[in-house]
Image: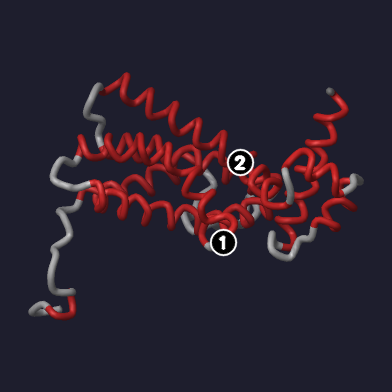
Amino acid sequence: MKETEETRGRIVAAAERLFASGGEEATSLRAITREAEVNVAAIHYHFGGRVGLLREVLDRHVGPLNQRRLALLDEAERAYGTVVPVATLLEAFLRPDLELLARLREEQVQVARFLGRAYTQPSPVLEGFVRQQFEPVAARLVPSLRRALPDLGDAELRIRLNLIVAVVTGMFATATPAGRPTVLGSDDIEQQLRFLVAFFAPAMSAPRAPTGASPVDRPGG
């Protein structure tokens, strides 16, 4: 059993290195087997093939991140009850991303960029998996946002949340090594969090978007 787990871990680590350095679409199973010193049968045995391995590599980081998000949302509800302030909900949502990004910038900045690419421009084989990973968090967060912002419907809340996700995944895709300038101007997680929440909370809380004519069709547009 120990040998089996070691083999599985070696394959995932090798795939992660190659996906991060060369891109998932350009990385062949043959290259992964060479890097991990296993045969193709081992990859099929443990992961069912290349797609299963790619999902395992992503879930290695995103699975714990989403579990932390849910735990922080639990804490927020214990502290505030049914209606949690928007800023607190966004802090619970964003903090795990910033923590993961900080760790990867210190040790594996190419992995941060790979995660960002995988979620900003998912390949056809990953698109459904990306939605599947995010849905448990959205299913928990959207109702909480609805209670905090009763004038907004689920569809608009999800659009606004997707815009936030687009910014954060862009931060991963363009990550710089620790110590180099970032788009947020600081390596301090608390300062980054304060900036993002101050920016996103008013946008999330803005009045419902008007329907009908586009901005360029309206007077003064």
**Is residue 82 left or right of 199 when viewed as pictured?**
left
- The number of discs equals 2
Image coordinates of residue 117 in percent, x first then y, are 58, 60
Foreground mark, 2 or 1, reads 1
Residue at the disc numbered 2: 59
Q: Quadrant of the C terminus?
A: bottom left
- At label 2, counting other C-alpha atoms closer than 10 Å, the crowd grade (few under 14, some 14-19, many 20 or more) is some
Image coordinates of residue 47 in percent, x first then y, are 73, 42
Nearest the eye: 28 or 120: 28
> Which coloring applies here?
secondary structure
Residue shown at 78% from the left, 36% from the top: 9
* SS at badge 2: helix
Q: Quadrant of the N terminus?
A: top right
**Is residue 63 left or right of 157 when viewed as pictured?**
right
**Is residue 91 left or right of 57 when viewed as pictured?**
left
**Is residue 55 left or right of 184 when viewed as pictured?**
right
Nearest the eye: 104 or 121: 121
Where on the picture, by quarter, is residue 116? bottom right
Residue 174 visible from this viewpoint: no
- The answer to whether 187 is drawn above or below residue 64 in the figure is below
Q: Which badge, 2 or 1, comes first in the chain's sequence? A: 2
- The answer to whether 89 is drawn above or below residue 201 in the figure is above
Image coordinates of residue 111 in percent, x first then y, are 67, 51
Which numbered marker is on residue 7?
none
* SS at badge 1: helix
Residue shown at 44% from the left, 26% from the top: 71
Residue shown at 80% from the left, 43% from the top: 11
The extreme left residue here reads 219
Nearest the eye: 198 or 27: 27
Q: Amino acid at mark 2?
A: Asp
Residue at the disc numbered 1: 124
